[in-house]
Amino acid sequence: MEQQLQDKIQQFREIVASSNNIVFFGGAGVSTESGIPDFRSVDGLYNQKYDYPPETILSHTFFSYRPEEFYRFYRDKMIITDAKPNITHLKLASLEKQGKLKAVITQNIDGLHQAAGSENVLELHGSVLRNYCWECHEFYPVESILESQGVPRCKHCNGIIKPDVVLYQEGLDDEVVRKSIESISNAEVLIIGGTSLAVYPAAGLIDYFRGKHLVLINKSSTPQDKKATLLIQAGLGEVFGQID
């Protein structure tokens, strides 16, 4: 089994080495090795116990009607400011600097791709690092949320400050989706990593891929495994740690 994995990683290395038109599509598994929990694994947020399920708390309706409880959970579980980019983030940034990687499309909201040095990052679900007044749209950094008590309020109009993250019941940003579709459609190699491909509409974006190699790297199986030209069931760090 170990030799079979190494053979697949070698094949992956050869694909990366031979292409200058790569796009990476990643989910929570990209950041778990930085200490950020995912949502759906055994130890993920969906398997912890709160007064309300996380998917209820992280909904537009809950934010609208129970903002104080939303922020109690959000500060406790969603903002992790001491996390550092891991080997996968760093390797992807290196591939971009080499001109090989054209875009990172991420479902994560932690900003770690940018912290690693990636510049063309498309954040499907927004970022905890950005926050805006719901009324006047004044920008607030993440520190404003952490340093506030209860529901953070705008210093200009006293409106509620909302994280720039896509909550349940909210649509994705049209421009981010458009750029993601364009990037995937034009890619020769699409690398999908660390995602269950269970969250739509984000997971549906990979249907736009028409390129040569669809590489899927994930510890567990996904609904799209059969579409992969190369399937590697392993941790991302183990795989990207062997990329030049």
Image (cartoon, helix red, strand yellow):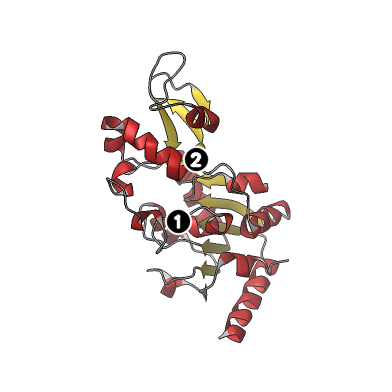
Q: Quadrant of residue 190?
A: bottom right
Position of the N terminus by quadrant = bottom right
Judged left or right of residue 80, residue 120 is right
Label 2 environment density (alpha carbons within 10 Å; few <14, some 14–19, many ≥20): some
Label 1 environment density (alpha carbons within 10 Å; few <14, some 14–19, many ≥20): many
Judged left or right of residue 213, residue 73 is left
The kind of residue on which mark 1 rests is: Asp
The answer to whether residue 112 is visible is yes
The kind of residue on which mark 2 rests is: Ser
Q: Position of residue 41 (x, y in %)?
A: 41, 63
Q: Is residue 107 above or below residue 145?
A: below
Q: Position of residue 239 (x, y in %)?
A: 61, 69
Disc 2 from disc 1: Cα separation: 15 Å
Q: Is residue 148 above or below residue 93?
A: above
What residue is shown with label 2?
127
Q: Position of residue 116 (x, y in %)?
A: 66, 48
Judged left or right of residue 87, residue 161 is left
The answer to whether residue 118 is visible is no
* SS at circle 1: loop
Q: Position of residue 100 (x, y in %)?
A: 68, 58
- Count of numbered circles in the view: 2
* SS at circle 2: strand
* Camera-nearest residue between 120 and 6: 6
* Camera-nearest residue between 109 and 212: 109
What residue is shown with label 1?
38
